[in-house]
């Protein structure tokens, strides 16, 4: 990936945008393997603001748009997968309604947490789409995070290109952040579980009317 981007550095913003948008239609391209190398190239070749500003904008727009494309795809068409007999054996309507309630209530924070845990971005977006999280909530959470993560990845790439930082340092920091976020998520889930057990009642569910919409999807 880095070699391809290097050979076509003059078209850097467009390459970054196209590669990131490709992940929105199911092609497994991680944002970090596009954005960081782009920053490295800019740092190594000392390209000016005429290149790095459009590239950074392309990175932000590309990631956020790709996420919204995949979310929309899962929301509109992915629910058909849950009608498969094999899957329906494990997903009782009661469980679906419970999951729907949690996504409606905490879906935005679910998306935010997933942005900082490696490997969880696509699964989280898929679940949010299948459970029909409100689009504006998803978009707000996604854009808020991407405005932080994309510049951070881009900046690390530039620093690596200048020889000021290393990728291993960024990787270590990323895993530390992921560990902290994961610990917070697990703690919050444990608190919610403890409260539900203390009340000796079943977890709350979404309205059963959602299932009718769900079956028509």
Image: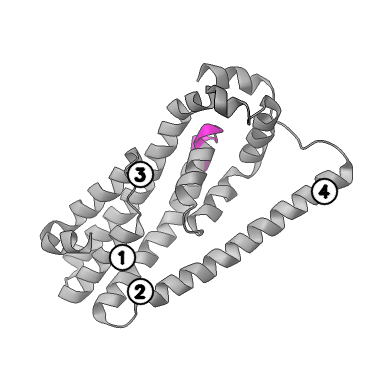
Image quarter of the N terminus? bottom left
Label 3: few (<14), some or many (≥20) within 10 Å? many
Q: Which residue is mark 3?
A: 66
Q: Earlier in the sequence, mark 3 or mark 2?
A: 3
The answer to which image quadrant residue 57 occupies is bottom left
Q: Earlier in the sequence, mark 3 or mark 4?
A: 3
Residue 213 placement, left or right of 39 = right
> Helix, strand or loop at disc 4?
helix
Q: Which residue is mark 1?
A: 36
Residue 117 placement, left or right of 38 = right
In 3D space, how far apart are the residues under numbered discs 1 and 3 (Cα atoms)?
17 Å
In 3D space, how far apart are the residues under numbered discs 3 and 4 (Cα atoms)?
37 Å
Label 2: few (<14), some or many (≥20) within 10 Å? some
Magenta-drawn stretch contains 34: no
In 3D space, how far apart are the residues under numbered discs 4 and 2 (Cα atoms)?
42 Å
Range of magenta residues: 129-137
Label 1: few (<14), some or many (≥20) within 10 Å? many
> Helix, strand or loop at disc 1?
helix
Q: Which residue is mark 2?
A: 167
Q: Is residue 46 above or below residue 24?
A: below
Residue 146 percent coordinates (x, y): 42, 55
Q: Earlier in the sequence, mark 1 or mark 3?
A: 1
Q: Which residue is mark 4?
A: 195
- The reply to whether callout 1 and callout 2 are in contact (CB within 8 Å) is yes
In 3D space, how far apart are the residues under numbered discs 4 and 1 (Cα atoms)?
42 Å
């Amino acid at each position: 990936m880095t070699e391809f981007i290097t050979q076509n550095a003059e078209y850097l913003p467009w390459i970054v945008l196209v590669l990131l948008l490709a992940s929105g239609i199911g092609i497994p391209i991680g944002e970090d393997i596009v954005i960081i190398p782009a920053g490295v190239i800019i740092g190594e070749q000392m390209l000016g603001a005429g290149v790095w500003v459009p590239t950074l904008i392309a990175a932000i727009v590309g990631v956020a748009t790709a996420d919204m494309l995949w979310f929309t795809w899962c929301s509109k068409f992915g629910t058909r997968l849950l009608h498969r007999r094999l899957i329906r054996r494990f997903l009782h309507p009661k469980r679906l309604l419970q999951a729907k309630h949690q996504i409606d209530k905490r879906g935005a924070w679910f998306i935010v947490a997933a942005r900082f845990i490696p490997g969880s971005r696509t699964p989280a977006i898929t679940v949010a789409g299948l459970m029909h999280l409100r689009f504006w909530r998803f978009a707000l959470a996604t854009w808020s995070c991407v405005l932080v993560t994309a510049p951070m990845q881009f900046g690390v790439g530039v620093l690596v290109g200048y020889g000021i930082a290393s990728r291993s340092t960024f990787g270590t920091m990323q895993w530390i952040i992921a560990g902290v976020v994961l610990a917070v998520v697990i703690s919050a889930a444990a608190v919610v579980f403890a409260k539900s057990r203390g009340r000796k009642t079943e977890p709350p569910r979404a309205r059963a009317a959602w299932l009718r919409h769900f079956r028509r999807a």
